[in-house]
Image: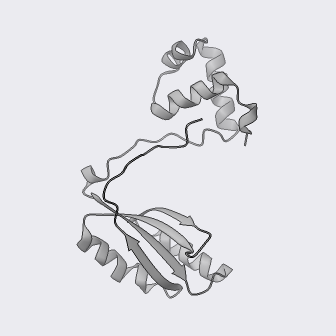
C-alpha cells in the first residue's frame, strides 16, 4: 500500500472525487482535476494497483430493502484463543444480518453492526444465531437513535 506521504495533491483530489462518485467518467474526472484523461487514467490505475483504491460499489439504502433498524452488538468470547476466534469469525460470515464485524481491543472481543427489519427480527437473530455459538460468553446490544455522520472512508 502507498504511504499517504507519497500521494500528491492530484492523487488526493482524484480520491475525493471518486469517493463521492465512483462512477464519474474519466473525462469528467479529468476536467475536474485539470489534467488530460490519459494521465488521470494512469493515476487511477496506479492508485488501484497500490491498494489505495480497493474497489467500487453501489451505496444501498438498507431501509429501502426492508432493514430500517441497525443494532450495535458487543460480543465477548469465552476465551480469546485462535480456535474461538476462527469459530466465531466463520459463523459471522454466514449471518446476512451482520453488516460489519470488527475484532476489538478492550473489554469486548468483537463489535458488530446488525441490520434487521425491526426489534423482532433482531431478537430472532440473537436467539437463533448469535447466542447459539458455543464460543460466545456475553452479548451487549445498543440501538442507535440517529446517524450523525456517515462516510465511505476517511477523507484524504
Could you tell me residue 42's position as x and y percent? 67, 23
Rendered position, 9 above or below 5: above
Could you tell me residue 84's position as x and y percent? 60, 82
- Left or right position of 45 against 2: left
Could you tell me residue 119's position as x and y percent? 25, 71
Rendered position, 20 above or below 130: above
Rendered position, 25 above or below 7: above
- Left or right position of 143 against 29: left
Q: Quadrant of the C terminus?
A: top right
Residue at 57% in and 76% down: 107
Rendered position, 96 above or below 25: below
Res. 89 image quadrant: bottom right
Residue 152 in sight here: yes
Residue at 52% in and 16% down: 32
Along the viewing direction, whichever of 118 and 57 lies nearer the viewer: 118
Along the viewing direction, whichever of 90 and 122 lies nearer the viewer: 122
Residue at 51% in and 64% down: 101
In this picture the colour scheme is one colour
Residue at 24% in and 57% down: 66
- Left or right position of 50 against 149: right
Residue 22 in sight here: no
Could you tell me residue 70's position as x and y percent? 34, 61
Q: Quadrant of the N terminus?
A: top right
Res. 73 image quadrant: bottom left
Amino acid at each position: 500500500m502507498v504511504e499517504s506521504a507519497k500521494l500528491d495533491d492530484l492523487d488526493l483530489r482524484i480520491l475525493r472525487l471518486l469517493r463521492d462518485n465512483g462512477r464519474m467518467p474519466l473525462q469528467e474526472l479529468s476536467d475536474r482535476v485539470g489534467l488530460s484523461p490519459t494521465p488521470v487514467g494512469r493515476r487511477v490505475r496506479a492508485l488501484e494497483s497500490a491498494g489505495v483504491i480497493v474497489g467500487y460499489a453501489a451505496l444501498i439504502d438498507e431501509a429501502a430493502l426492508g432493514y430500517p433498524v441497525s443494532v450495535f452488538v458487543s460480543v465477548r468470547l469465552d476465551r480469546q484463543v485462535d480456535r474461538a476466534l476462527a469459530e466465531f469469525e466463520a459463523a459471522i460470515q454466514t449471518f446476512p444480518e451482520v453488516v460489519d464485524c470488527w475484532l476489538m481491543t478492550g473489554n469486548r472481543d468483537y463489535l458488530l453492526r446488525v441490520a434487521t427489519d425491526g426489534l423482532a427480527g433482531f431478537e430472532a437473530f440473537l436467539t437463533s444465531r448469535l447466542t447459539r455459538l458455543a464460543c460466545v460468553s456475553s452479548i451487549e446490544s445498543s440501538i442507535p437513535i440517529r446517524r450523525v455522520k456517515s462516510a465511505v472512508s476517511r477523507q484524504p
